[in-house]
Image (cartoon, rainbow, N blue to C red):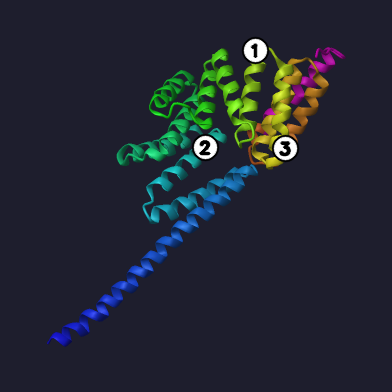
Amino acid sequence: MRSQKLAVVVPLCLFLACATAETKKMRDYAAAEGERVSSRGDDSLQKGATLDAIRRYETALRQFQRNDDLPKIDATDLKLAGVFLMRNDVETARKFVEGARLVVKKENLGMIEEDLAVSESSLLVASGAGAEASALLKDFAKKAPARPSLRLAIAMGRAALATNDLAESYKIFDGALAAGKGTPFESAVRVDLARVLLKMGKPGTALEHLKAALELDKKAGATVVLGDTLHFIGAAYEASLDYSSAEYYYGRALSANLQTDLTEKAEADRIARSRVRGLAKAAPGKRTD
């Protein structure tokens, strides 16, 4: 009888062991495939192919969901929120942010909290609630390490800029630039600092930062932001009343943005180029440095 039981139990154990090994293999595959596809989504986003990035992130999300890998699910949700914000689809972005917020709250995912705070603030700024974004980030910063990360500092500076607090945003971005030189964040900080300087009526200083950012964008192959940087260079020349240079850079911005699927940005470039062309005809030769 004992041998009969063993005859049943041993094959059953072997079957379970094989099943467990196969399950582990499937889980490992899902995790690796999710990472691979997410990385390709990052590449697509860098090139300005936002629709392809969304498709790849959604595929990665399904792979992570197979393993119920909550940190990676949340991180991918926030990536998707960022791309939809880039496409000015605030409501879809909000759904992904709210989904991530629920998981962070229920599961106490501390490693995602900063990403969530930055994404929530970006959503608020895009919704015209800059003051709420500032309050949210300041509250988070109280719980964060003594020195905010560069990502958090950039978000805080953008929230301050959205409320037109130029002194505060300048202070934040100036400090972030000192800490961020030589990092992947340097270009973004320089562009944001230039935006503040333009509002302060200092287009010449803004141009210095924008042209430095342009070289960094080109070196990184960051097509997705190249058009923005060129557009702001055009804006700085327009503020300097150098309409010829403004038209030139708005044209370059248009060429760059036409390589992406961000059609609203390309249209903004066309409008700006047409505007300065008209200004140049109305005031030929007028220019200040």
Q: Position of residue 282 (x, y in %)?
A: 82, 13
Within the magenta stretch, is there residue 12?
Answer: no
Q: Residue 75 at x, y = what percent?
A: 45, 43
- Residue beneath label 3, please? 256
For the point 24% across and 80% down, the residue is 10
Q: CA distance from mark 1 to mark 2?
A: 28 Å
The secondary structure that dominates the magenta segment is helix
**Side (left or right) of 239 relative to 35:** right
- Closer to the camera, 55 or 219? 219
Label 3 packing within 10 angstroms: few (<14), some (14-19), many (20+): many
Looking at the rendering, the stretch of residues picked out in magenta corresponds to 266-289
Q: Which mark is residue 82?
A: 2
Q: Residue at x 44, y 59 (%)?
A: 30
In the rendered image, the quadrant that contains the C terminus is: top right
Q: How many numbered markers are drawn? A: 3
Question: Mark 1 = which residue?
Answer: 200
- Secondary element under disc 2, as helix, strand or loop, is helix
Q: Label 1 is placed on what type of residue?
A: Met
Q: Disc 2 marks which amino acid? A: Gly
Q: Earlier in the sequence, mark 1 or mark 2?
A: 2
Residue furthest left as drawn: 1
Which secondary structure, mark 3? helix
> For the residue marked with disc 3, what is the amino acid?
Ala
Q: Is residue 167 visible?
A: yes
Give the mark toward the camera: 1 or 3. Answer: 1
Say whether residue 270 is visible: no
Vertical side of 286 occupied by 173: above or below = below
Report the Cα–Cα distance between label 1 and label 3.
Answer: 27 Å
